[in-house]
Amino acid sequence: MFITTAGRTTREMIAEAIKVAEDLQVPYLPRNKKSISLIQQQTDSDCIVLGKERLELYEKNSSQPFFFHPNSAMFRIKRLINGDFDPFASAAKLTKGMTVLDCTLGLASDSIIASFLVGREGLVTGIEGQKYLAFIVQQGLQTWNSGLTAMNEAMKAIRVIHSDARDYLKKQGDSSVDCVYLDPMFEETISESDGIKPLVHLAIHDDLTDEIIHEAIRVAKLRVVLKDHYNSLRFDKYGFQVLQRKTAKFHFGVIEKN
């Protein structure tokens, strides 16, 4: 991995790119009028390109960059404001002031919804095991302008932590978070979405293990929510109550602690 700037580079962009490289502890390489693909061929590496408005992640041998976008969160929040149904919101039963631990942050769509629901009084923490994805999503959450004040505030309030979910859970106290959320379907989600296909090799999460599930149940004070394929055996295996949705590929399962 290396960091560089967009083709039309300014001193400010160069300084920011150098800072990003230092934060990620990877090299900064100046463009010197070279194409991204040429530099990648010379270095045999993925790269992050700093532009005027966003960071873009390019996998080697791919012309499609990944950049942060809130995806479905924008229209979902608009629907919630209008009093419409959201399956994740219904499963998690989040209210103002609650704390949420999203163990599989990915592109943060559900974390944005959770942050909107818990408000300034609450806290959403997102765990992402992929270092560069975590960085780009964290930066995007702080800088993306959705045009909705409530959504902007919700994005900025999310705390992003780069960590293995199991390791992070093991360090948390019993019943220390109101709701723990697990979404192991990120690999399949990527494969079905043209907008985020550039991350197919970078953003695949490890499968959920017995230990992760058990730790999630221990850490949760109120409930654990699992999003999984409708045919998943994990719902029955771990005792989740399934909230079935006709024609939906994914269901939500809930374990209530009380």
Image: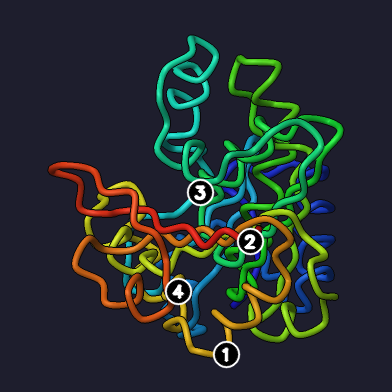
Question: In the rendered image, which residue does mark 1 sit on?
Answer: 211
Which quadrant is home to the C terminus? bottom right
Q: Earlier in the sequence, mark 3 or mark 4?
A: 3
Residue type, mark 2 in image: Val
Report, in whole angstroms, how far the alpha carbon at label 2 lies from the one at label 4: 24 Å
Report, in whole angstroms, how far the alpha carbon at label 2 lies from the one at label 1: 14 Å
Question: In the rendered image, which residue does mark 2 sit on?
Answer: 180
Residue type, mark 1 in image: Glu
On screen, 89 above or below 125? above
Q: Is residue 31 visible?
A: no
Q: Is residue 170 visible?
A: yes
> Which mark lies nearer to you, 2 or 3?
2
> Which mark lies nearer to you, 4 or 1?
1
The local crowd at label 4, few if under 14, some if 14 to 19, many if 20 or more residues have their Cα within 10 Å, is some
Residue at 63% from the left image edge and 73% from the top image edge: 217
Residue type, mark 3 in image: Phe
Task: State left or right for residue 105 relative to residue 179.
Answer: left
Secondary-structure class at tag 3: loop
Mark 2 vs 3: CB contact within 8 A: no
Secondary-structure class at tag 1: helix
Secondary-structure class at tag 4: loop
Q: Earlier in the sequence, mark 1 or mark 3?
A: 3
Q: Earlier in the sequence, mark 2 or mark 1?
A: 2
Question: In the rendered image, which residue does mark 4 sit on?
Answer: 202
Q: Position of residue 211 (x, y in %)?
A: 57, 90
Q: Earlier in the sequence, mark 2 or mark 4?
A: 2
Report, in whole angstroms, how far the alpha carbon at label 4 lies from the one at label 1: 24 Å
Q: Position of residue 1 (x, y in %)?
A: 59, 78
Task: Specify the label residue 67 is tagged with.
Answer: 3
